[in-house]
Image (cartoon, coloured by chain):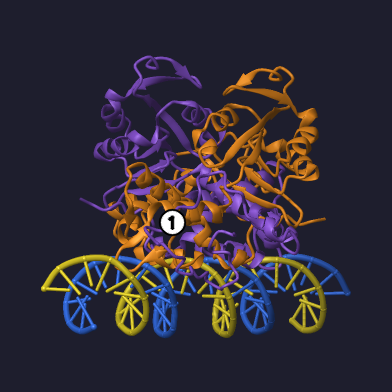
Chain colours: A purple, B orange, C blue, D yellow
Amino acid sequence: MATGRTHRPATRSRGIPEATVARLPLYLRALTALSERSVPTVSSEELATAAGVNSAKLRKDFSYLGSYGTRGVGYDVEYLVYQISRELGLTQDWPVVIVGIGNLGAALAGYGGFASRGFRVAALIDADPAMTGRPVAGIPVQHSDDLEKIISEDGVSIGVIATPAGVAQQVCDRLVAAGVTSILNFAPTVLSVPDGVDVRKVDLSIELQILAFHEQRKAGEESSAEEGPDTDAEPAVAAPPAPRGATGDTGRKGPDGDVPAVMPA
Amino acid sequence: MATGRTHRPATRSRGIPEATVARLPLYLRALTALSERSVPTVSSEELATAAGVNSAKLRKDFSYLGSYGTRGVGYDVEYLVYQISRELGLTQDWPVVIVGIGNLGAALAGYGGFASRGFRVAALIDADPAMTGRPVAGIPVQHSDDLEKIISEDGVSIGVIATPAGVAQQVCDRLVAAGVTSILNFAPTVLSVPDGVDVRKVDLSIELQILAFHEQRKAGEESSAEEGPDTDAEPAVAAPPAPRGATGDTGRKGPDGDVPAVMPA
DNA sequence: ATGTCTTTGTGAACGCGTGCACAAAGATGG
DNA sequence: CCATCTTTGTGCACGCGTTCACAAAGACAT
């Protein structure tokens, strides 16, 4: 069976670096805002600050798309909006199915950011018969029995999984078998997909955990000078388990030696 | 004015690379699953496939934390769970406020992944008086007038913004002024924060746009073997050219871009 | 105790991404 | 038409992250 290759093995798609592709939507959003304010042109410096990136990076990113700027002037907003939209494939209609209409699925169904970017919610699918037919965000929920039919009839190639983690893999398998080749996964699971299928993962709790790490670091920095023996985090979890019959302390070494690798006595 | 520094300027926090920190929650999840199945030890190879990463990368990641493995055997699951939890700061309680209780905010309030990782939803805050007092996911919504009081009284340092884009920046400012130093932003805006405040952004439509890019590439590959740098694929769209005098026809739309910048063919 | 076998931990090479700094390009004014 | 000024596009260097490959370390059998 195909091992789930979620990560991208340095796939430089079409010569455009992956990091650049990830920033294009950012630029597009900033450009759209400018367009709505009828701003005709914008310099790389202005647009960069609006998008929250470095101006040199922005110019290099655009250079992968082509020479769409005018030296001494900047970039034509409308033209650039069109070029980026086209490069991202947003000039065409992308039907999307959302599977799992719980709290999150309902939120996604009503999310305005989808329709505004060329994505059309083709169907909402849930396994609960009680949900079937009930309109969510104006779209009637369909039962998961019809999943394959819906996908093939509407030519859906992008699926969003917002189910519990336990069923995410089988939902994924059915989506892929039915012809879906891109999946946005909100379930906290690593999905296994065959080659040729793209998976992107959004995990809300992971983001919070990363924030917690930095928050802890910040808190530790300001009080590390003092706070002598009180620095132990007072674990709310069980006592630190001994590493598998390690009777005496084998003297667990930290990476640099300054890290309290062992729990502070 | 403090320029919004959203991106991390190569901040190697505490000697642990940022990329490693971002993967720790992944390992933690896989380890927790093993722990629940009472698996005593796990090799780097097994854990790596469970987490969907390379085994060498996993070992190097763990090496930043310390030498927690046993050669010839592997890693003690319970011990590693504890160590990673401690490193991420999950052994302590993190009160979190969620601002903006719309569809998404409600979904976040009920998301189980928070509580299970040491995060406690301290308060739900919304600007709509009609929402005040109404329980969402068992927690009564409070009015945004009390935002500062709630944060200082509960010692909240992490805030989640799930408001419309238009008010995200002012909500952010109030959060920061009240003492919040980490923000998880779901609004499609670049937030400006002073130094020392961490911002992580989750943008649902950006993920979809990245998928669309790869989807388009896949579709293009199978149909046309050529497709040179000659960009004019002749779409039936309004105005590709005219980088300068693109006057008129681009009838702009409503508030926050609810129509594709270029109409689909 | 000694040898074998498994698995970790890490040195080193490589590739990607980032940012600097500057020359080329074009606009603009005289 | 020429000079000057602005801004793009990019060559280059550097640092981070990834991966390979292997020696060191410990378990286990004899």
Residue at 57% across / 48% down in the picture? A235
The chain holding disc 1 is: A
Estimate the x, y position of residue A168 in percent, counting from the top left: 35, 37
Estimate the x, y position of residue B21 in percent, counting from the top left: 53, 58
- Looking at the picture, tell me which residue is in the foreground, C4 or A36: C4
| Residue A190 visible somewhere in the drawing | no
Determine which quarter of the picture holds residue A149.
Answer: top left
Label 1 Cα crowd, 10 Å radius (few <14 / some 14-19 / many 20+)? few
Considering the image in quadrants, where does the N terminus of chain B appear? bottom right
| Residue B192 visible somewhere in the drawing | yes
- Looking at the picture, tell me which residue is in the foreground, A30 or B136: B136
Considering the image in quadrants, where does the C terminus of chain B appear? top left
- Looking at the picture, tell me which residue is in the foreground, A82 or B152: B152
As drawn, B242 above or below A251:
above
Q: Secondary structure at mark 1?
A: loop
Residue at numbered disc 1: A242
Estimate the x, y position of residue B33 in percent, counting from the top left: 37, 44
* Amino acid tagged 1: Ala
As drawn, A46 above or below A136:
below
